Every structure is written in C-alpha cells, then in structure tokens.
Image (spheres, grey):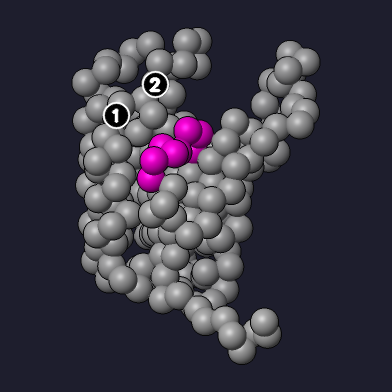
Amino acid sequence: MSFEDYKTKESVVIVYTGESKGKTSASLGLLVRALGNRWNVAFIQFIKYWGVGEHVFIRDIMPLYKDQIHFHKGGKGFYKAGDLSPQHISEDQHKKAAQETYDEALRSATSGNYDLVICDEINNAVHDGLVSEAQLKKLITSRHKKTSLCMTGRDFPEKLLPLVDIATNMTKIKHHFDDKFLANPGIDY
C-alpha cells in the first residue's frame, strides 16, 4: 500500500487517557499545532480552577490569536479526591459547574465555529459522575462534521472507544510523586 491509497478524514475524535501525566500537555501540543495551521480552537477545561501554567500561557497568547482561540475555565477542582478536594465546595456546586462547562463544550463542538474543541479533564468529570456517559456520547456524536474533538482525563469509558479515531493511554513507568515529592510547577502543572 502506498500513500496514494490513504485518505484524510474531515475531522477526528481524539482521547488522551490513562493514569499518568501528560494528557493535558498532549492536548496543549495539539492546540499549538492547530493554531499553527490557522485553525479556530476552543479549549474547555473541566476540574482545574486554580492557577496552572496553561492558564497563563493561553491568556498570554489570546491577544495574538484574537478570534482563533476561545478559552473556558470551568469546574470547581478535584472531586472526591481526599485531601486534594476543596473542602468548601459542595457536591451540588461541583455538579453545577461541571454541567455549565459541559454545556459550553457542547455549544462549541456543535457550532461549526471551531476546527478543534479540546475538553480537558472531561473524562474525570464523567468518571466522577458530574457528567454522564450519555452526555459524553452526545458530545462525540453531535459535534459539527468539520470539528475535531479532543478529550482528556483518566478513565475514558471503554464502551465509547468505538466512537473515537485516536486513543492514547498514558502509562506511568516512574514518577517522583511515588517517592513523596510534590508536583513541580512548569513540569506537572
């Protein structure tokens, strides 16, 4: 078979999942590639409400790319994650924030205004019951035909894998967190 036998898809569905680090970083690489190709990109972030490096980066590049990039920071932090969960945020507040963020993702994916919609940490929101699997399936199947969709986070539902084109499982070989070292800014967040 030669390259002439291959064709391109109008759009694709991409999943970055798994227990290890690198899912958000991979989606940011995708954002950079898409913007470099003059695509319109929506970056919709579930879970992370605290300041992380990608927020600063996206904020700083938004004036350069003007209408090419849309950023929405939703969510209320880790949910049911023990000491990592914000104690002052109720279950109802988590669910409301996740649903508002999902609505923004669905609007962006179905609008036809974006070549790529990245839903960072949406898989976590589904796994935690803040967004339903049925909603995730709707997001995948109802997106605009020319809009590629990227979903990140742990625990992507296995039964939805037939709906995606590219799925990558990030597998940890070693991480300094296991040796009781905290996450490093610029590397881990």
Q: Give above or below for 98 relative to 110.
A: above
Spot occupied by residue 182 in the image (x, y as percentages of width and height) = 69, 20
Q: Which mark is residue 79?
A: 2
Between 5 and 61, the residue placed more toward the observer is: 5
Secondary structure, mark 1, is loop
Residue 81, x across and y down, in percent = 46, 16
Give SS at disc 2: loop
Residue at the location (73% across, 18% down)? 178
Q: Do callouts 2 and 1 mark residues in contact (Cβ within 8 Å)?
A: yes
Q: Above or below — where is 10 with respect to 89?
A: below
Using the rendered view, name the quadrant where residue 78 is placed: top left
Percent position of residue 160, x then y: 38, 45
Q: Residue furthest bottom?
A: 4
First in sequence, mark 2 or 1: give its number. 2
Quadrant placement of the C terminus = top right
Give the residue type that dot 2 points to: Tyr
Q: Is residue 55 visible?
A: no
Report the predominant secondary structure element of the magenta stretch. Answer: loop
**Residue 93: image x %, image y %?**
24, 23
Judge left or right: residue 51 versus residue 92.
right
Q: Is residue 158 above or below residue 183?
A: below
The one of 156 and 83 positioned closer to us in this rendering: 156
Residue at horizontal 50 percent and vertical 10 percent from the top: 83
Quadrant housing residue 129: top left
Q: Residue furthest front?
A: 1
Q: CA distance from mark 2 to mark 1?
A: 9 Å
Q: Nearer the viewer, mark 2 or mark 1?
A: 1
Point out which mark residue 164 bears.
Answer: none
Quadrant in the rendering for residue 88: top left
Tell me the magenta residue range. Answer: 153-160
